[in-house]
Image: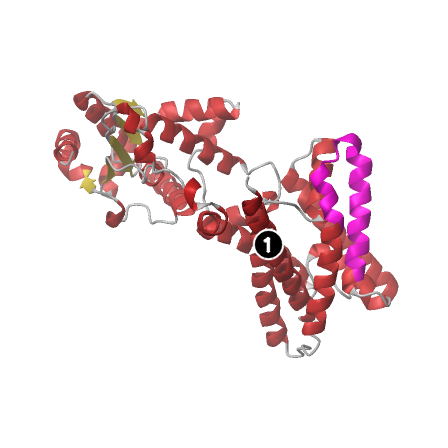
Amino acid sequence: MSKMELLKRYIFFFLGLFINSFGISLITKAALGTSPISSVPYTLSLAFSPTLGIFTLYMSIVLVIVQLILLRKNFPKQYWLQIPISFLFSAFIDLTMYLLRFLAPEAYIVQFLCLLLGCLILGTGVFMEMAADVVMLPGECFVNAISKTFHTDFGKTKVAFDSSMAITAVIMSLILFRGLAGVREGTIIAAVLVGMIARFLKRKIGAKVEDVFFRPAAQEKEPASEKTASLGEEPMIITIAREYGSGGRKIAEKLSQELGFAFYDRDILSQAAAKLHMDEREVEKKDQKITSIFLYDMLSQLYDFSEQKPILDDVYEAEKQVILDTASKGNCVIVGRCADDICKDFTNVRRIFLYADEGHKVGEIMRREGMSESNALKHVKEVNKERATHYKYYTGKVWGMASNYDLCVDTGTAGVDKTVELIASIL
């Protein structure tokens, strides 16, 4: 990383830190409870003279000290940056609280709107800190230290940490005020929304931010098509996306045989499993298995500042790398797994989508899997919903929309041989 890029990342981080503090202050001013990480400092600031920013600084220093005790010689040098950043973050919080001193909403609807706006701003700040990727705040470093020391899952440790902060704030509130102060419904809402907003922004614009703000023009990604120039003639890549029950795998395999192309379907699973050092059956269970984008984002936000990743993200990234590697080797037919989007930088690619009417798909699954009609119908709907959700999550596109493909074929009407012929005709 060049010095100029590092400077840009730190500037972006500090801007995100200020936006982060503004979001915290706005959530706090909504008076419906603050974020879990700020709940203890805020409760103390209500009872004693130091400000929210100062109590946040005190807590940050305590968290750094505990990290030093836990990690000892393994305490990373960059973690020392937490100390000056904590001072700056404390100052930003007090500054933004001062800027918002006029805000004291009394109507619940106004309080709730302020809370939601604060979550949006805080989520944006968190995203910017993630995108800068230079240093973590003490809260995330503390959870990371716990996770490494005791070999616990980062996501579960993050939940335990946030919960302990909120519970501690509740206990303090009951002792100091004989009632709840600083922890309310807004604490729960912030805990759920902020990370989801940050992850949504990362998924939607993370790559663009990286390209626009950090990547020097001279180091821009070389198109995948140029990477294959050394092969002489660029490989022909055919991606086959298909509805479950449309016979897509059978058609793709026959097409590859007739053209003399390499065929990749389960090979992608086995190679991804090898990369992840996982059993292939375990990878298969996670393959294209997102049932709800909302729920997945809510759970995945817990890993945003961790070296660990949600397993579905790991599987997708491993499969993506396998697909890119295989696509650059030679002529091939690749089945499913967002290959049409993954291979978008190749110029010599044909994107195919295969579909069929419900009766055809159900009949195919009944014959192939030995299911009853009702079970086959349910299974077809479940699998196709998972594929559509998975595709939407990782590509941002609509699975099966004609504009995303070069050719869409109703296999129930065309049949296997005619479908193979149609695909071959557009090469």
Instruction: Report the magenta residues as a range.
Output: 54-83
**Location of residue 188 with respect to 206 vertically, above or below:** below
Residue 323, located in which quarter of the rendered image?
top left
**Location of residue 6 with respect to 116 vertically, above or below:** above
* Residue toward you, 109 or 121: 121
The image position of residue 353, as x and y in percent, is: 25, 40
* Residue toward you, 86 or 388: 86
Question: Which residue is labeled 1 in the image?
Answer: 11
Q: Decide whether residue 60 is among the magenta residues.
A: yes
Whether residue 370 is visible here, answered yes or no, is no
Amino acid, disc 1: Ile
- Which part of the image, by quadrant, shows the N terminus? top right
Compared across the picture, whether 168 is left or right of 157 comes to right
The image position of residue 119, as x and y in percent, is: 59, 62
**Location of residue 47 with respect to 262 vertically, above or below:** below
**Location of residue 85 with respect to 391 vertically, above or below:** below
Compared across the picture, whether 337 is left or right of 78 comes to left
- Which part of the image, by quadrant, shows the C terminus? top left
Say which residue appears at 43% left-offset and 23% top-offset: 271
Q: Decide whether residue 234 is among the magenta residues.
A: no
